[in-house]
Image: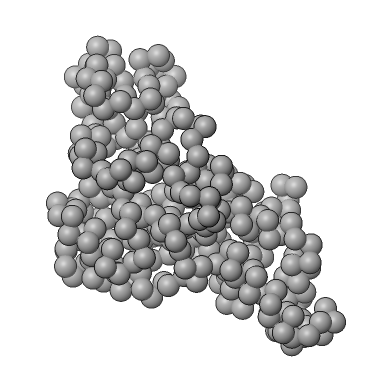
Amino acid sequence: MLENLKKHYGEALTTNYNRHDTNFEWFQTDLGKPFGILKSVLSSEERNLLSLLFQSTNSIDETQYTLNQRKWYDFLFSDNHEKLPPLPNDHTSLRFYYFFLKQPIDDKQNFEEAVKGIMNTELVIWLSLSHGIMIEEKPNYILEVDLLKDLSDTLTTDFYVEPFIYIGQLQKNDTSLKEKFSLEHACFQNIHRSSNKDKVLSFYDVLPTLIMRAPSMLRKEILSNHFLEIIEDKELLHTIEAFFQSNLNASSTAKRLFIHRNSLQYRLEKLLEKTGLDIRIFSNAAFIFLAIILAQQEK
């Protein structure tokens, strides 16, 4: 949609967001990407139509962002491609969570406090009154899905909203992070629009659905760099393949590889710590199987 608007309005449209520039009417896409169109080229009918199609940036008071929220928002949504992630280098991993509410919420502050009281994050960034992201800067590599289901129930009970929470991959803190976020965010947006009824889903759960509903969105770059590095490790990739060939049976895999079961356990723990994926869980194994095919096909 944004590309079509660029073709129509040409230089009158900008994605260099400056909320203080009153010459522009400012909007944002469903994915939180801000853009502005010169007021002088907009008719009242066009302005009304754009207001129906896109969220006005005025609905979120960015002046209330903390310094850390502002750094993350600028990193994720500005057009400055040279910016590095606002995390110290000793933070090797992080995870994004995406939430959508069926109804806009007025009490954002208490909503955030409820989130922080349950989750291991202090960072909630609102992109509209019904959509936002949570950033876990020091993530536990093991997904606590039940904890998020409890959070969903709590938010429903306390705030009378129906939240849908999507769990991103364990991402590497590197220069590819912004691209990884954008691709992952777009995938979850697609899943949410397609009449999803599950209140909590991880990226590992939705990959099969994406293959059916939005195959054009799937390419190697959608996979986290942690995962891509794992499948470049020949020993670990060989172990994963042997595990599949042994029908996810650890004893049979160890025999097939001529290694001690403890050695196999060590390799599987390495996979878990790097990617957050436990191949002994069927849904994780299914994701790994499909993701390897995706990565190797492009190669």
Residue 26 % position (x, y): 27, 27
Image position, residue 13 (x, y; %): 36, 19
Front residue of 61/293: it is 61
Q: Residue at left 75%, top 47%?
A: 299
Q: Can residue 204 be spotted in the picture?
A: yes
Write the residue at 35% across / 69% down: 148
Between residue 283 and residue 134, name the one nearer to us.
Answer: 134
Q: How many numbered badges does the structure rendering display?
A: 0
Displayed quadrant of residue 165: bottom left
* Furthest-left residue in this view: 106
Question: Which of the two residues, 202 or 169, is positioned nearer the viewer here?
Answer: 169
Q: Compared to 50, does 243 lie above or below?
A: below
Give me the residue at 35% from left, 61% from top: 121
Q: Is residue 119 shown left or right of residue 59?
A: right
Furthest residue to the right? 258
Residue lying farthest top? 40
Q: Quadrant of the N terminus?
A: top left
- Residue 217 in the figure: left or right of residue 195: right
Instruction: List x then y, in percent, for residue 100.
Output: 31, 54
Residue 86 in picture, x, y percent from top left: 44, 44
Is residue 58 depicted above or below 194 in this figure?
above
Quarter of image, res 123: bottom left
Residue 198 shows in the view: no
| Residue 22 in the image: above or below residue 102 | above
Q: 154 or 67: nearer the eye?
A: 67
| Residue drawn 75% across the image and 60% down it | 233
How are the colours assigned in the image? one colour
